[in-house]
Image (cartoon, rainbow, N blue to C red):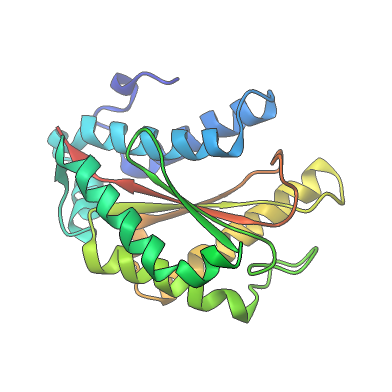
Amino acid sequence: MIGISVFKGRGFLMVLILVAFTVAGCAANGGMTDTGKGAVLGGGGGAVLGAIIDTGNPLVGAVIGAAGGALVGAAAGHFMDQRRQDLAKTLAPEINAGQAQVELLKDNSLLVSMTQQTAFAPQSAVINPGFLPTLQKVAGVVSTYGKMTIGVIGHPDRQGTHGERQRLADQRAEAVRVQLLGMGVPPALVTASGNPNSQYMDGRVELVLTPLVSG
């Protein structure tokens, strides 16, 4: 785990890049499941941002402004549990059909998992039109309540070399990120990365909703 003090005074984009590299390194070493990766992206992002909110960094200020403010410490758990209930309700058709899952992680991040049946055809980075209503529901919750970021994790298919899987996973994550932007989620709140070492290898997409916490 990277020490939080490393990030103090640095730009938010650098924070996200370093966290992403940490996740990629753990995955490459076979020491992290996809849920674990979501936890790091969620917990790392929230903890790091909490550590640098008071530095006066304009990039951090832009993120907080785009999210409509940050949560105060202990309020994050209650806030994100409410968002879990909101998502469970609005995604009920997808959940009941086995096409989505919503999980509250220990760090108060939400892991929203989508299956390949709704997201991408094999070897494709073009979003299935049937997946768009699901993304719109997630975007709607984030836009309505704010105070959180979205980390998009793309997953590859089994075919191809490691480099080809990386490229496809990245392209899928980026396709979802761009779609979320088109649905009204501010660019400062959405990041995307592929996981070529996924234990699933079925083209699914995961969204990690992380609360913005100050103190």
Residue 105 x %, y %: 40, 38
Q: Is residue 123 above or below residue 17?
A: below
Please give the name of the residue rendered at 31% of the width and 38% of the height, measured from the top-left corner. 46
Task: Residue 54: give x, y in percent of width and height.
Answer: 13, 34
Describe residue 26's horizontal placement relative to residue 117 as left or right.
left
Residue 61 rendering spot, x and y as whole percentages: 18, 49
Please name the residue shown 40% across and 40% down the image: 42
Judge by depth and name the residue closer to the eye, 18 or 28.
28
Occupied quadrant, residue 108: top left
Residue closer to the observer: 212 or 9: 212
- The quarter of the image holding the N terminus is top left
**Residue farthest toward the front in the current orientation of the protein:** 96
Judge whether 204 appears above or below 200 on screen.
below
Measured as percent of width and height from the top left, residue 63 is found at 25, 53
* Above or below, comparing residue 206 to residue 42 in the picture: below
Q: Residue at x 44, y 69 (%)?
A: 180
Looking at the rendering, which quadrant does residue 130 occupy? bottom right
> How many callouts does the rendering have?
0
The residue at the far bottom in this view is: 129
Quarter placement of the C terminus? top left
Quadrant housing residue 176: bottom right
On screen, residue 28 versus residue 44, left or right, reads: right
Relative side of 86 to 55, left or right:
right
From the viewer's side, name the closer residue of 181 and 119. Answer: 119
